[in-house]
Image (tube, rainbow, N blue to C red):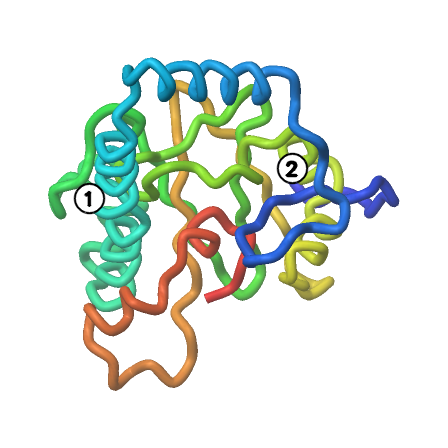
Amino acid sequence: MTDAQPRSAPAEHDHDHGHEHPHARPPAAIELRVQAVEDLMREKGLLDLDLVDAIVRHFEADLGPMNGAQVVARAWVDPAYRARLFSDATAAIAELGFGGPEGANMVALPNTAAVHNVVVCTLCSCYPWPVLGLPPRWYKAAPYRSRVVREPRTVLAEMGFAVPDDVEIRVWDSSAEVRYLVVPRRPPATDQLDQAQLAALVTRDGMIGVAPV
């Protein structure tokens, strides 16, 4: 999929900026039902919030964006690894110890001066957990899933990322069969940084393609 002409549909994103979005939607019926079940389980002592927090920390830390950041940083400093990553991303990512469910068939997408890649799952929320951890809420929200396909340049601008008009935007639709990792362009003036320092610059949103690095 490629860039589409901008349209004027209202934006709606939970983009983790630490403030409420002016167009935030009310909770959906399913969300209210989930909250009600959670409250009932807590009242009956069936839900251990400490255990839930531990599971979330596991996905955010052990299976989190820093895994993907290590992959990207390695690709920036090691041309041979970069070639393997774009030839067989699943195997190259496994070299660093990352893989498994939700990441069994990976494709790495290189951003260039002429092409910018962005990832979405239009059907549900397929997402590469082994390298990016848990998907953000905005990634699962219907407005992002529908609008970024039709008007990617507008949606990215609303999320704070103005892609130059002369750069082609390619939108990739994740599925249960294949999941994508965007490899951002290495920032300028970073020749003095080592791999660990470079990894610290890489963000989750950059590896989805909705933010620059």
Which of labels 2 and 1 is toward the front? Answer: 1
Q: Quadrant of residue 58?
A: top left
Mark 2 closeness class: few <14, some 14–19, many ≥20 residues within 10 Å? many
Task: Give, as a three-letter code, the residue at label 1.
Answer: Asp
Q: Position of residue 67 (x, y in %)?
A: 24, 49
Residue that numbered label 1 is attached to: 62
Nearer to me, 78 or 184: 184
Q: Residue at the location (40% across, 19% down)?
A: 176
Q: Position of residue 60 (x, y in %)?
A: 29, 44
Q: Residue at the location (24% across, 33% down)?
A: 55
Q: Quadrant of residue 106?
A: top left
Q: Residue at the location (55% across, 58% down)?
A: 18
Mark 1 closeness class: few <14, some 14–19, many ≥20 residues within 10 Å? some
Task: Give, as a three-letter code, the residue at label 2.
Answer: Tyr
Q: Which mark is residue 124?
A: none
Q: Is residue 173 above or below residue 78?
A: above
Q: Position of residue 121 (x, y in %)?
A: 53, 29
Q: Residue at the location (25% across, 24% down)?
A: 101
Question: How many angstroms separate mark 2 from mark 1 (CA)?
Answer: 27 Å
Q: Which mark is residue 144?
A: 2
The C terminus is located in which quarter? bottom left
Marks 1 and 2: in contact by CB < 8 Å?
Answer: no
